[in-house]
Image: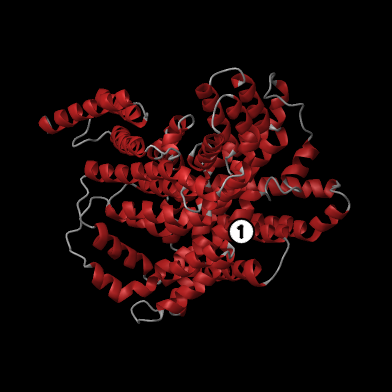
Amino acid sequence: MLTDRKFNRDGIFISSLLVLWVIIQILINTFIYVDDMVLRCIHIIFLVLFANLLYGNEKKYIKLLFVAISIFVFGYVICNYSLISERGGYTNKIDLIIATLGFIVIIVTGLKTNKNLTLLALFFVSYLYWGKFITGPLSHSGFSYKRVLNFMFWGTQGIFGIGVGVSATYIFLFVLFGSFLKHSGFSNFINDFSLALVGKSPGGPAKVAVIASAFMGMINGSAIANVATTGTITIPMMKQCGYDKNFAAAVEAASSTGGQFCPPIMGAAAFVMAEFLQIPYSKVMISAILPAFLYYFMLIFSVHLEAKKLGLKSADEEVILSKVLRERVYLFAPIIVLLIMMAIGYSPIECAVFSIFVTIVVSSIKSATRMDLQKIVEAAKEGALSAINVGIACVLIGLIIGSVSLSGLGLNFGNLILKIVKDTNLYMGSFMVMVMSVILGMGVPGVAAYVIVVSVAVPIMISLGANPISAHLFCLVYACLSNITPPVAISSYVASSIAKSDMVKTSLIAVKLGISGFIIPFFFINNDVLLLQTNDLLLTIRVVIGAIIGIGAIAASAEGYFYRKMKIYTRITLFILGILLIDVGIYSDIIGIIGILVIYYWERRFRD
């Protein structure tokens, strides 16, 4: 864990560099204009610098030599990128040598910090070579070494693509903001607040994490930034409560992801969808209420069951809510300022930087929370350290996205799916569109992923019998869920970096927690009731109640706990009954209710 690392005798030098990095990032993001490529190069230089100084067992002179090479390579890019652009993108031999060195620098650094993701990135890059030897729609004609380097290094869709662009801007600043909140005493305030609010309920901090992430996610529209913002506070809280670090990271990743399709704001996707459909924004918002509610209901119920299964007790001490608010409510001011600025329309970067300064000022109200110079420096160092793993992961993901873009793998796979489902039924077609949506949405912000998927998939779904608003919402949900779906589960990776957990396990647990998001769209794709698009009030009430009970059954099945640990056959039965209750049919509801009551009686009657 980097933040726990004891610096050696060079610690003062490294600490000074970390603070310098923070100052430079704030200046070039808000006060000093620089070209996007310059910003990304500077960010990568610092990422490689600290990753190589703090990781690996090489001798010091080897580390310094490697750092010098990386500074030379990316410094060369800063000095020559505009010149290459002016000559139409033409690159000479020296440019290609620099690109080769830059690629090696990224891969070596990645192997030190995130071996699994680096190997995955290398697999996708290698596809640009061996893809020409396979046949079928996923094959390609091959790419020369020069074209690959020009695209991956001298273009803006590979190493310098959206991944590092996101890391260099709001991810870094929001991680830094979280660190300042922590050192201002905000995390302790939130911990006491959650204890006062739900302290008597098992897993209280995790429930607070779900609610807070939902609220933040619907506003900022970025699952990544949401994890970076709230995760630095909620993940340590959950770990302290007794949750496993993999589970804690998964809760944060799944909670943050759902905010992109959670009304009323839906991360701005609602406005884009209304424009596509030429319908009022309010209708889009209403249609997303029940799917989003069921998604978060399962998350909250899952963390409750996990707490019961682990035997996590409620707080022994009684915390009085009024006392907590009276003494430290002022610490909530930075979050309120952040939300207000976002609602008004300020950019996430401006919101994050201004909120950092507000945090410092607000903490000075009382001596117990006041941030002196030492605390400010510690907060800056910790924030920068926390951003290193996330930043390197974003650079590696850029290689994956670049490989998919250059080869046309995403569109080719999409065309293959659409060709298969062209003359099939709606549900089979929807399943294939789900796969395509998840793939095309990997590593792409929610709104952008939605636009990509909609342009390809919605016409086919409508031709198969789906309602337009159902088809659009279907694509949005799955495009957003790609943030927690392996192999490019970027939200899970960011949360894992904060929790210091296993990325693969975190991603798989996040998918399990968010399983309702993968199930519900198949029920609303051809049924307006689940989208609250009907005038039959009694039918709506019955469907809503049935769906809530059904999601609760699925959560219990996924967690394997319902008053006691369940056998596998009981879990499977409960899962099926939950599916029946989500369906809007009256007979399926009756069967589901009777079945759950039988299991409920059995588990209560014969519990250990």
Q: Is residue 8 visible?
A: no
Percent coordinates x, y for residue 317 in the rendering: 17, 63
Viewer-side residue, 352 vs 494:
352
Q: Residue at x 38, y 40 (%)?
A: 513
Q: Is residue 572 left or right of residue 447?
A: left
Q: Is residue 254 visible?
A: yes
Percent coordinates x, y for residue 75 in the rendering: 74, 60
Instruction: Determine the secondary structure under disc 1.
Output: helix
Total numbered badges shown on the rendered structure? 1
Q: Is residue 41 left or right of residue 491?
A: right
Image quarter (top left, top right, bottom left or bottom right) of the N terminus: bottom left
Q: Residue at x 44, y 68 (%)?
A: 336
Viewer-side residue, 561 vs 470:
470
- Image quarter for residue 330? bottom left
In this picture, is 123 found above or below 51? above
In this picture, is 318 found above or below 516? below
Q: Which residue is mark 1?
A: 168
In this picture, is 211 found above or below 554? below
